[in-house]
Amino acid sequence: MTTLQSIRAVVLTLMAMFAMTATASEPASPKAVVEKATFGIIEELNKLKPEERTEDEVRRLVTTYIVPAIDQEKIAMGALGKYWRRATPEQRQAFIDRFRERQIRTYSGAFKAFSGEQFVYSDPRFSPDGRKALVKGTLQQTNGQTVPVDFRLYFDKDTNQWRVYDAVVAGLGMVKTYRDQLSQRLQNISMDELLAELAVEDSESDGELTEESADQDNS
């Protein structure tokens, strides 16, 4: 190889490296974020036999694919509404943890019942300033019926990523639904009492899962 050929090879290599770096630094689109979360877990479920879809395994998949796409603080803030501002930093963190656990249980229950449904998403609609996006989707059930499932995302400058802050299923917004329930509850009890109630619910749910797992092992 001549000196000129060597220089060309080095230049081409550097150009390829720069191109790869530029591509890696570009954030995934809102649609790609939603598809990675939902398609990723469905692909993993399709690899499992029915008896392998245990509560622990489905929970692991939800934690791996769904949870990272969600901004836990922002969605918890929306769910608490005005009560978020009144909460102490310790109460806020405790609520984030409890609310994340509730989301994991909800998504785990939904995906454990998965039986071949498919998600189809449209291209995102952006807000005028480009900082928020709506990804409208449809859950196509095996019986031919469809359910609208939309995701609201915002661009997180700190992480350079699009992150989910709300989901709307069949016209019902998850954040608004929880905010209405929690607001009504917090009119009668304190934040600490609410957190205690959520802790009890988590404990009871864990007990039910343990009993179910034991029944599956014995069957």
Image (cartoon, rainbow, N blue to C red):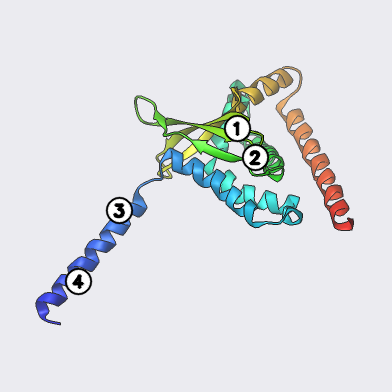
Which comes before the other along the chain, label 4 or label 2? 4
Q: Which residue is located at x 45 percent, y 39 percent? A: 31
Q: Amino acid at mark 2?
A: Arg
| For residue 202, above or below residue 182 | below
Q: Residues within 10 Å of mark 3 (few under 14, many from 20)?
A: few
**Contact (Cβ within 8 Å) of mark 4 with mark 2:** no
Q: Amino acid at mark 4?
A: Val
Q: Which mark is residue 100?
A: 2
**Contact (Cβ within 8 Å) of mark 3 with mark 1:** no
From the top left corner, tell me how far across and down residue 196 is, in percent: 77, 34
Which comes before the other along the chain, label 1 or label 2? 1
C-alpha gap between disc 4 and disc 2: 49 Å
Tell which of 24 and 158 is nearer to you: 24
Q: Which residue is mark 3?
A: 22
C-alpha gap between disc 3 and disc 1: 33 Å
Which comes before the other along the chain, label 4 or label 1? 4
**Contact (Cβ within 8 Å) of mark 4 with mark 1:** no
Tell which of 81 and 205 is nearer to you: 205
Q: Which residue is located at x 20 percent, y 66 percent? A: 12
C-alpha gap between disc 4 and disc 3: 18 Å
Q: Which residue is mark 1?
A: 76
